[in-house]
Image: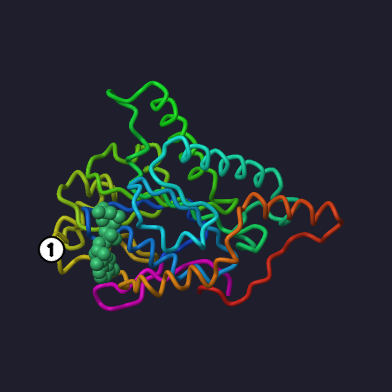
Amino acid sequence: MGLTRVLLGRDESREVSWLRLSGVPGMTVVGLPGYGKTQFVMHLVGELAPCPYVQFGFIDGKGGPDYDDVADRAFAHLGDDLGAALELVEGMYELMQDRQGAIRAHLDVKNFWHVGPSRLWPLVVLVIDEAHTFFHTGRGVSRADQEAAHKLIWMVEQLVKKGRSVGFFTVLLTQKGTGDAIPTQIRDVCPAKVAFAVATMEAADAGLGSAIRLYPDAHPIFLQDPKYIGVATTALEGRKGFARVRIPQVDEQHVAQLANSYRHLATEPRDLFDLACGVLDAGGSVLKPVFEGTAA
Ligand SMILES: Nc1ncnc2c1ncn2[C@@H]1O[C@H](COP(=O)(O)OP(=O)(O)OP(=O)(O)O)[C@@H](O)[C@H]1O
Ligand SMILES: [Mg+2]
């Protein structure tokens, strides 16, 4: 079976739940500080690091060491520098356009997910942690930074809007509980939404959509207790409404070891694309991926 989903955790009836990757171009993750947003990404890295069909780019708006231990498995690892973040996202946007132009010739399909990720056409997982850091466009921000932020917002929006059929998965995390933490034009196009504990109804609305108000039993406002660290509310496939899911606790040392063991897989996806073009130029056959049992 190809890479179509990844383990999310267990719901309240201890059933295993999954996060769909196929056909999902974006995910927002919101929640109060310390409730498990970054650890959730570490869990995903742990699950996906051995898969040669996944490339990670990490942008950490916190600018701290959170991603240092898994950086080996990433083609890019940036801190809170807006200019550097914009440059990386610009590169991804260009790659998305190039993939759009080449997908028929390379993969013989219009939608990447009809064949699934492969070595030369990997799923590009771009994580922007503390995403609100990069989206300031208001007063007190220099004109140059405002321009850069507007550009970044537009490009991230495009990546999420159009990245689905060419293998991009953008993940935005924020602890800021206000509606503007992740601009609405990005938020509204992210089909996957995950909320750890939040402090206000507005933060829940921003993170999950106002429909969460119809499901008080799953409302993330009631997750404000240390016993719910690592528990998130999300919509689960095939089920109505929202459910609470406990994300597996990450053994940080283990994930760091995994990232290190599979560091040889980390390659700039642009180089892989160029390689794919070269293979075709050299008369190679259409690049249909070979599925080898990766994540279920
Ligand atoms: N799924 C989990 N199971 C058990 N404990 C967890 C889980 N996720 C996180 N934790 C604990 O909570 C701590 C904080 O988690 P994490 O750094 O992911 O929070 P965060 O939401 O990213 O916070 P911030 O907004 O400050 O970055 C972790 O160091 C860990 O001890
Ligand atoms: Mg964090």
Percent across and percent down for residue 74 are 51, 58
In this picture, residue 13 sits left or right of residue 278: left
In this picture, residue 22 sits left or right of residue 104: left
Q: Which residues are magenta?
A: 1-18
Q: Rate crowding at label 1 as few (under 14), some (14 to 19) or many (20 or more) other CA atoms within 10 Å.
A: few
Residue at the far top in the pictured view: 143
Percent across and percent down for residue 23 are 52, 56
Q: Quadrant of ligand 1?
A: bottom left
In this picture, residue 177 sits left or right of residue 88: left
Question: What residue sits 38% from the left and 67% below the top?
Answer: 43
* Viewer-proximal residue among 79 and 273: 79
Question: What residue sits 45% from the left and 73% below the top?
Answer: 257
Q: Is mark 1 within 8 Å of ligand 1?
A: no
Percent across and percent down for residue 210 are 25, 46
Is residue 167 visible in the rendered image? The answer is: yes
Q: Which residue is mark 1?
A: 225
Q: Is residue 230 above or below residue 274?
A: below
Q: Quadrant of the N terminus?
A: bottom right
Is 220 covered by the magenta stretch? no
Assign a secondary structure to mark 1: loop
Percent across and percent down for residue 151 are 47, 31
Is 6 covered by the magenta stretch? yes
